[in-house]
Image (tube, rainbow, N blue to C red):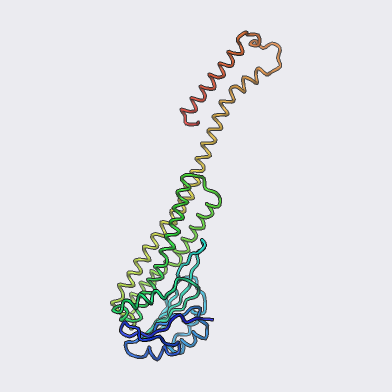
Amino acid sequence: MGRVIASAVYCKGKKVSDIPLEDGYRWACQPDHFVWTGLQEPTPEELSNLQRQFNLHELAISDALEKHSRPKLETFGDALFMVIYSPVRADNRLMFVETHLFAGIGYIISARHGFSQSYAQVRQRCEARPLLLAHGTDFVLYALLDFVVGNYEPVVEAIREEIEQLEQRALRYSLTQEEIERIYGLRREVLKLKHYAAPMVEICQELQRLDFPFIDKQMRPYFRDVAIHVNRLLEDLGSLRDIASQTIEVGLLLESSRQSIVQRKFAAWAAILGLPTAVAGIYGMNFSYIPELHWHYGYFLVMGLLVIGCVGLYISFKQADWL
């Protein structure tokens, strides 16, 4: 069942009153008034009610009943329909809440599908700036877009902190399989964020070009400001994607280097131990006539040579940084 979060009428930047959903069109027709309605999980009946009141295009209603894969902006005469996405990250899972916006002369309707940060904050901020709210639906449209783009920032910062922690760990220790999988997961999240954020630039550019009665030319710099924020966000996401990829590469290179060091140490100790093993193997043969067997000081001489040889090999490997 859908829920009406708020439905109110405004005039010259000030809230007139809260109104029921059925009275929206009557107030929207009055000069200098506009209706701002916020819905959550609207039902087909509620959308049909709004369609009858504000003469919403049937294709816009059809789109509002479907789920989409990317943000988009469509125009229907002097009205527009927009799909935007707000990211939500909980329990290391990234999700996107889809919001549909209908805007036209005297009305703006937001329909949120899912649970995210409440848009009531947008209404409070707009009501606190009556001079800008006096512009009407175009300022509310800007405020909603700016709020959605702002929701990306804490998500991006949380991913950045996690990637940087894994990067520091990769420089000190060997990455476990879980950590490598986590880096790949973070990289996928970055790509998803970019997938949903990138079309916002085109949407803001289109809003700057549209010649609609309810979009004042004085509001175009505000839409350009949102586009600038999105471009900065895309730059940050691009750098995070590169850092995640480089972290995996650096981790693999460092692990290969660590394994090479271990292999060199094993080879060095094998060479050092190989000398006494070879000598012991020779004297362990069961031949009766080995010349050195009857030397009075043969044992001490051989042991001394072995110590000198092993120490010499140890010093050589140490200087070559193999030990």
Identify which residue is drawn at 30% across, 79% down: 130
Instruction: Give the percent coordinates (x, y) of residue 230.
Output: 38, 66
Identify which residue is drawn at 28% across, 77% down: 218
* Res 78 visible: no
Query: Is residue 222 rendered to the left or right of residue 84?
Result: left
Identify which residue is drawn at 46% across, 65% down: 195
Locate residue 126: give its quadrant. Answer: bottom left
Instruction: Give the percent coordinates (x, y) of residue 89.
Output: 48, 64
Instruction: Give the percent coordinates (x, y) of residue 122.
Output: 38, 75
- As rendered, which of 90 and 280 lies closer to the eye? 90
> Looking at the figure, which quarter contains the N terminus?
bottom right
Instruction: Give the percent coordinates (x, y) of residue 295.
Output: 63, 8
* Res 267 visible: yes
Query: Is residue 291 rendered to the left or right of residue 155?
Result: right
Locate residue 23: give its quadrant. Answer: bottom left
- As rendered, which of 15 and 194 lies closer to the eye? 15
In this picture, is 254 found above or below 206?
A: above
Locate residue 269: give its quadrant. Answer: top right
Badge count: 0
In this picture, is 55 found above or below 308?
A: below
- As rendered, which of 4 and 246 lies closer to the eye? 4
